[in-house]
């Protein structure tokens, strides 16, 4: 899951980015409205955390324009303004949720999870595909009753695949949702991670869940 | 506002009072003038008649004998002494109460008028004039006598009574009409005032962006314009206050947001101690920033309230800068900048040493903050006429021309995200400007983007 954070306070951005990376999200940061809008237009984010008071272009305007351009990525408004009218304005311009600064990190994470879940088909924090289970809260995975140990990046990729069961997911899509813009797309890192995931998920005798779609990408097959 | 206490009421009362005095005066004048002129006409006719009768001895004789034919409405009586008794002769034998001394005066040769009232209450105007009577009989010869002619004043009395009745009705009616007219006029004249007061009240209660409609250029128009001007200034002051409060809360919340996010993130799970150390360092840094911000906000609040204590003494600016140089040099070296101490003239100003130190330290701090390594920050003191000029020059990022007019305003920042990262509060320059102005001085800036800035503080020299 790839998240864009737009806030003019660089130090707050740094904390938020660090915390989100810990939770296995890919994070990009923008420090003003124009940069934020540009990034949101060119990259397929799964969530945008957007401050209202921004230099160059305020968060409400950015939100409005993104929605006008048909970009429906969930937006979490982050603002120092706690006036009710600002929250209403934020939600009315197309934001999905808001969080008033200062906030506890756990609340930010909970709201991020809730918004990402809303996009998924299931409303439960547990994702299930066949006998594969992924808890997005504890970030634990099981194949049947067998727990699977995942690294952060493996988890990110598996979560993304499990959000889209049976759909063909290209390498580019995985790159875009699991890595931030520092990622070098020429490398075959995606294939390496997929191979590792397969090794962890499929024990001998078990059905292979992650299938390769020749010339296209991968598919997480639901029985 | 009750009607009795309104200007309308008082205005009408005063106007009625003046009008009543005027009307009463006029009425009394008219009454007495008419009365006098009517009596004068009557007296003239009495005089004429008297002269006419006296000039003909035959008429006098007929009067004496009581055979004279009086004209209608007149009574003619002749008085003379026969021996010691006063003889009264009137043709119709009508007796009227004529005062004795009045007759005596006429007999001695002095004519005079009098007004008397008969037993029936009818008024009579009398003229007694002296005549010489040629008496026959024992006491024959010329003898002084008095001829009295009386005419009724009934017509005059009636005319005056009619006038009095007319005035007694007309004056109150006129006053009543004037009262109604007065209230109407006062209301008309003061209606715009009521309207202005009403609008001003609404504006004061709800919406300072509204204005009173100015329709005329008279006194009321000017009043409305003056009020509008005042409301505008109030509105601006409120807006500034609101902006400042909003800015201040945003600025205070920014470090709080970092502190809360950082601390709650650190507590999410067990971490190596180096992670905790990093978090605590960030929190400590934010706390320092916040306490600086609070200090500066308090300083400005004190300045706004006019509650500052200034300790003015003679301050040698050159020496002051020289003492600052050590601190400035350490700060520069830490950031990899070169510090240059320029020419320092010994110039004495009247000032608060601590606050001046704060002013120059703020400027140096600012210069160091916005100058990337390897740059240069320098400070110098020179004399320009009757002013001491302290110049702080850096080779830093510079200030865009469009931002220069605003950089001394509170919380104005050229690049908000960068400034906060560099540790600026957005209040330093506002404080510098305040201190410079409290010393009767000014502060100005010259800057070029990418080349650097020079802040100059002009302070008036202390005249010895």
Image: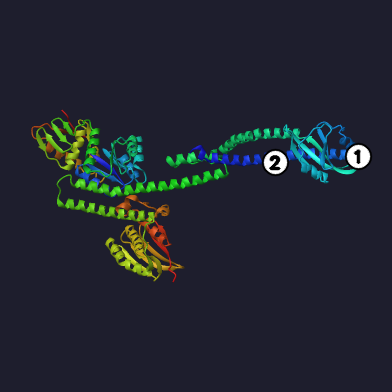
Closer mark to the observer between disc 2 and disc 1: 1
Assess disc 2: are there few (<14), some (14-19) or many (≥20) residues with their C-alpha within 10 Å of its C-alpha.
Answer: few
Assess disc 1: are there few (<14), some (14-19) or many (≥20) residues with their C-alpha within 10 Å of its C-alpha.
Answer: few
Residue A169 screen position, x and y as percent: 22, 34
Side of A141 where B199 appears, left or right: right
Q: Quadrant of residue B296?
A: bottom left
Residue B300 screen position, x and y as percent: 36, 55
Q: Residue furthest top?
A: A223
- Residue nearest the observer in this picture, B228 or A78: B228
Give SS at disc 2: helix
Side of A50 where B69 appears, left or right: right
Can residue A213 be seen at all in this image of the molecule? Answer: no
Q: Residue furthest left?
A: A205
Q: To which residue does mark 2 refer?
A: B29
Q: Residue at x 72, y 35 (%)?
A: B160
Give SS at disc 1: loop
Can residue B291 be seen at all in this image of the molecule? Answer: yes
Q: To which residue does mark 1 refer?
A: B137
């Amino acid at each position: 899951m790839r998240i864009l954070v737009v806030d003019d306070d660089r130090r707050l951005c740094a904390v938020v980015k660090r915390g989100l990376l810990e939770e296995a999200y890919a994070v990009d940061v923008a420090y003003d409205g124009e940069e934020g809008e540009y990034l949101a237009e060119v990259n397929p984010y799964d969530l945008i955390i957007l401050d209202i008071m921004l230099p160059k272009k305020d968060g409400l305007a950015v939100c409005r324009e993104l929605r006008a351009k048909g970009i429906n990525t969930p937006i979490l408004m982050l603002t120092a303004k706690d006036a009710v009218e600002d929250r209403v304005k934020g939600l009315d311009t197309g934001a999905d949720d808001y969080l008033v600064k200062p906030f506890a990190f756990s609340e930010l994470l909970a709201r991020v999870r809730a918004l990402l879940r809303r996009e998924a088909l299931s409303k439960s924090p547990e994702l299930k595909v066949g006998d594969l289970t992924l808890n997005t809260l504890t970030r634990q995975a099981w194949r049947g009753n067998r727990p699977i140990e995942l690294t952060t990046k493996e988890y990110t990729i598996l979560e993304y695949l499990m959000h889209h069961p049976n759909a063909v997911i290209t390498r580019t899509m995985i790159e875009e949702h699991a890595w931030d813009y520092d990622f070098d797309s020429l490398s075959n890192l995606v294939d390496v991670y997929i191979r590792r995931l397969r090794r962890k998920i499929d024990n001998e005798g078990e059905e292979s869940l992650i299938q390769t779609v020749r010339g296209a990408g991968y598919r997480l097959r639901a029985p | 506002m009750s009607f009795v206490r309104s200007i309308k009421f008082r205005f009408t009362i005063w106007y009625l009072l003046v009008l009543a005095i005027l009307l009463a005066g006029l009425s009394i004048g008219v009454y007495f003038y008419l009365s006098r002129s009517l009596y004068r006409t009557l007296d003239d006719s009495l005089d004429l008649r008297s002269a006419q009768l006296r000039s003909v001895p035959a008429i006098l004789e007929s009067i004496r004998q009581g055979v004279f034919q009086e004209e209608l409405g007149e009574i003619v009586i002749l008085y003379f002494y026969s021996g010691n008794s006063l003889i009264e002769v009137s043709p119709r034998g009508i007796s009227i109460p004529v005062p004795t001394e009045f007759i005596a005066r006429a007999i001695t040769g002095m004519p005079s008028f009098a007004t008397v009232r008969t037993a029936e209450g009818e008024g009579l105007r009398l003229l007694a004039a002296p005549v010489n009577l040629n008496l026959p009989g024992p006491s024959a010869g010329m003898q002084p006598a008095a001829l009295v002619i009386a005419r009724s004043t009934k017509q005059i009395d009636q005319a005056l009574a009619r006038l009095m009745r007319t005035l007694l009705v007309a004056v109150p009616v006129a006053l009543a009409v004037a009262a109604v007219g007065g209230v109407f006029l006062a209301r008309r004249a003061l209606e715009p005032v009521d309207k202005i007061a009403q609008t001003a009240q609404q504006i004061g209660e709800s919406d300072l962006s509204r204005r009173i409609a100015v329709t005329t250029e008279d006194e009321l128009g000017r009043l409305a314009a003056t009020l509008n001007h005042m409301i505008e200034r109030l509105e601006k002051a409120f807006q500034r206050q609101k902006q400042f409060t909003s800015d201040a809360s945003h600025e205070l919340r920014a470090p709080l947001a970092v502190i809360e996010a950082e601390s709650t993130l650190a507590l999410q799970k067990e971490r190596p101690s180096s992670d905790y150390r990093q978090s605590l360092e960030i929190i400590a840094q934010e706390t320092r920033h916040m306490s600086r911000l609070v200090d500066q906000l308090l300083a400005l609040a004190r300045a706004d309230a006019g509650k500052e204590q200034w300790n003015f003494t003679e301050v040698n600016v050159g020496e002051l800068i020289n003492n600052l140089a050590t601190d400035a040099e350490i700060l520069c070296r830490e950031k990899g900048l070169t510090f240059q101490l320029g020419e320092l003239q010994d110039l004495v100003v009247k000032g608060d040493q601590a606050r001046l130190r704060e002013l120059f330290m703020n400027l140096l701090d600012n210069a160091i903050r916005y100058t990337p390594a390897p740059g240069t920050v320098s400070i110098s003191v020179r004399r320009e006429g009757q002013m001491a000029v302290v110049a702080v020059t850096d080779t830093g990022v510079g200030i865009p021309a469009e931002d220069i007019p605003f950089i001394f305003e509170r919380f104005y920042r050229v690049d908000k995200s960068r400034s906060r990262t560099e540790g600026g509060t957005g209040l330093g320059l506002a404080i510098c400007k305040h201190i410079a102005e409290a010393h009767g001085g000014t502060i100005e800036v010259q800057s070029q983007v990418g080349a650097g800035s020079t802040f100059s503080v002009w302070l008036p020299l202390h005249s010895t």
